[in-house]
């Protein structure tokens, strides 16, 4: 099999990781999770002159999460644009025939400049996103140091809702497959959809 790069973009807490992990397990694909390298990628971009990445490195949780969600969302797209060259540099050094990679960093804007064999997105409904974030035990650690943790969490959720809305709008405009995960389908159904759109159903 010739080398194939499959990319799942979208928004946080949508099921991207779950799908990618299943694909890696079932097809023996190399799984590259952008979030596992995010601190390193932001540092590389900051060292390369990204003002936004440099600023975010120096901000406290209070400074990050107590800002307006619109400002946070706009900043997130800039960060992902600025780290993109370093993400794809890492991927280029992976010597595997099949690579599955996922992350919110793969925005439609970023993917206009880079290529993949297949690029799809998954976003959560706002209700699904909030309910699942509240179940994640590491969330309080992210917000540690915020003077009003509930307000900080609400800002975070609003930021991600705005992020998902923009992703969906850009996907519709560009004809990019975009799945909205509202929890009405099972994990298995989400996985089968991903296999179909990624062209994996008949690969084995």
Image (spheres, helix red, strand yellow):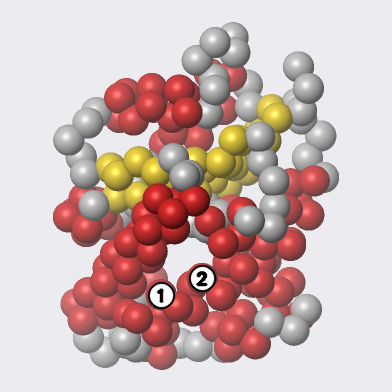
The quarter holding residue 130 reads bottom left
Horizontal side of residue 4 vs 200, given as left or right:
right
Work out whether residue 35 can be spotted: no
Q: Is label 2 in a helix, a strand or a loop?
A: helix
Answer yes or no: do the residues labelled 2 and 1 have beta carbons within 8 Å?
A: yes
Q: Between residues 192 and 109, which one lies in front from this camera angle? A: 109
Q: CA distance from mark 2 to mark 1?
A: 7 Å
The quarter holding residue 78 reads bottom right
Q: Residue at x 19, y 77 (%)?
A: 150
Find residue 73 and name its label: 1
**Residue 57 on image: x %, y %:** 58, 82
Task: Give the quadrant of the N terminus.
Answer: top right
Horizontal side of residue 19 vs 35, given as left or right:
left
**Residue 25 on image: x %, y %:** 54, 23
Find residue 77 and name its label: 2
**Residue 56 on image: x %, y %:** 54, 83
The 10 Å Cα crowd at callout 2, few under 14, some 14 to 19, many 20 or more, is: some
Horizontal side of residue 121 vs 144, given as left or right:
right
């Amino acid at each position: 099999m010739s080398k194939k790069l499959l990319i799942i973009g979208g928004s946080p807490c949508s099921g991207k990781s779950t799908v990618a992990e299943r694909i890696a397990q079932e097809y023996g694909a190399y799984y590259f999770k952008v979030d596992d390298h995010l601190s390193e990628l932001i540092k590389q971009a900051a060292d390369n002159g990204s003002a936004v990445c440099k600023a975010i490195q120096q901000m406290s949780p209070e400074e990050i999460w107590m800002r307006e969600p619109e400002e946070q969302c706009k900043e997130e797209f800039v960060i992902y644009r600025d780290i993109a060259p370093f993400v794809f540099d890492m991927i280029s050094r992976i010597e595997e025939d099949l690579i599955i990679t996922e992350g919110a960093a793969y925005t439609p804007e970023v993917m206009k400049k880079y290529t993949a064999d297949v690029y799809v997105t998954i976003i959560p409904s706002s209700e699904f996103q909030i309910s699942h974030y509240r179940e994640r035990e590491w969330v309080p650690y992210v917000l540690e140091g915020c003077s009003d943790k509930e307000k900080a969490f609400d800002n975070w959720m609003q930021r991600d809702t705005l992020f998902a809305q923009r992703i969906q709008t850009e996907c519709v405009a560009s004809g990019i497959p975009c799945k909205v995960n509202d929890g009405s389908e099972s994990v298995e159904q989400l996985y089968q959809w991903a296999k179909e759109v990624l062209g994996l159903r008949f690969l084995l």
